[in-house]
Amino acid sequence: MNQNYNREANNVGVTLTAIGWLTYIIGLLGGIFGFIASPGVGFGVWISAFVSGTMFIGFGEVVNLLQDMVDLQTAQLKNQRDPNTVTKINFDDLPKL
């Protein structure tokens, strides 16, 4: 993909990714303390933290990719509206009426 356009950071995507990583870290620590109490509780906390963190990171990546698409389309629209890049329409190829 050509990335000659300015990529703007999306706060929602960054926030969702950060929440995902925090979920991983807190889940790891919570799983360790839960494992001390009961192995089943520890594994349950680890699995739920892994699934939840992965979902948050995945949604954050989707938001970032959508922002990239919007930025690219905005750059393309700006190039189309530039009067220096407008081409003259050739009507010679049209059939005669």
Image (cartoon, rainbow, N blue to C red):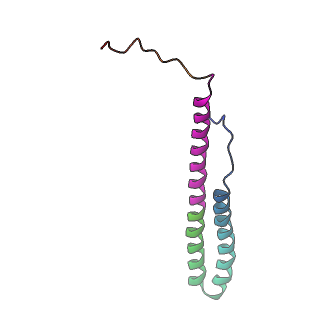
Image position of 83 with respect to 64: above or below: above
Image position of 15 (left or right of 95): right
Front one among 53 and 6: 6
Q: Position of residue 60 (x, y in %)?
A: 60, 58
Front one among 33 and 86: 86
Q: Position of residue 47 (x, y in %)?
A: 56, 73
Image position of 72 with respect to 81: above or below: below
From the image, give the main secondary structure of the stretch colored magenta.
Answer: helix
* Quadrant position of residue 43: bottom right
* Quadrant position of residue 83: top right
Q: Quadrant of the N terminus?
A: top right
Q: Quadrant of the C terminus?
A: top left
Q: Residue at x 58, y 54 (%)?
A: 63
Tell how many labels. Answer: 0
Image position of 88 with respect to 45: above or below: above
Span shown in magenta: 57-84
Is residue 52 found inside the magenta-colored segment of the image?
Answer: no
Q: Position of residue 37 (x, y in %)?
A: 64, 88
Q: Residue furthest left?
A: 97
Q: Residue at x 48, y 18 (%)?
A: 89
* Quadrant position of residue 49: bottom right
Q: Residue at x 52, y 17 (%)?
A: 88
Is residue 71 found inside the magenta-colored segment of the image?
Answer: yes
Q: Residue furthest bottom?
A: 37
Q: Residue at x 36, y 15 (%)?
A: 94
